Image: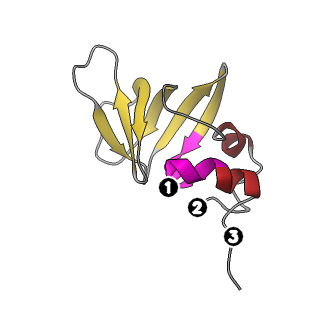
Amino acid sequence: MSLDAETTGTRSSRALLGEIIGLPVRITEAPGLQALPWDGVIADETLRTLVIRRPGATRLRRVAKSGLRAILVKDGDEVPLIGEVLRVRPEDRTKLLALGGRRRSR
């Protein structure tokens, strides 16, 4: 799934407009992670991963966006997060959401 007409316009996609680094997150489902749910703060983001800082942990953990289900806390609201929706370059996410999805060539 990518940022297209199916995902734009939803509460979740509107909450993703702007920066998500520094926001609290609770990971409820992710391939390869055990002892879920995980609470933490998003420390960094790439095209395919989120880097999470967990309280009390000394190292950052990189989590794949593919298969990720989480709850993001933004402006006091809990927003469901689906990793496949985030699978775009972080710098392009706001542009794609604001324009209504990917531009398709004809």
Please tell me whether residue 104 is drawn above or below residue 82 in the rendered image: below
Q: Mark 2 is on which residue type?
A: Ser
Residue named by callout 3: 103
Q: Residue 34 occupies which quadrant of the picture?
A: top left
Q: Is 93 in the magenta?
A: yes
Q: Is residue 85 left or right of residue 31?
A: right
Q: Residues within 10 Å of mark 2 (few under 14, many from 20)?
A: some
Q: Are marks 1 and 2 in contact (CB under 8 Å)?
A: yes
Farthest residue toward the top? 56
Per the image, label 2 sits on a secondary structure element best described as loop
Q: Residues within 10 Å of mark 3 (few under 14, many from 20)?
A: few
Residue named by callout 2: 2
Q: Quadrant of the N terminus?
A: bottom right
Measured as percent of width and height from the top left, residue 83 is found at 50, 49
Q: Mark 1 is on which residue type?
A: Arg
Residue lying at 34% horizontally and 22% vertically, measured from the top left: 54
Q: Is 10 in the magenta?
A: no
Measured as percent of width and height from the top left, residue 43 is found at 40, 30
The residue mark sitting in front, 3 or 1, is: 3
Residue lying at 45% horizontally and 35% vertically, measured from the top left: 28
Q: Magenta span covers which residues?
A: 81-94
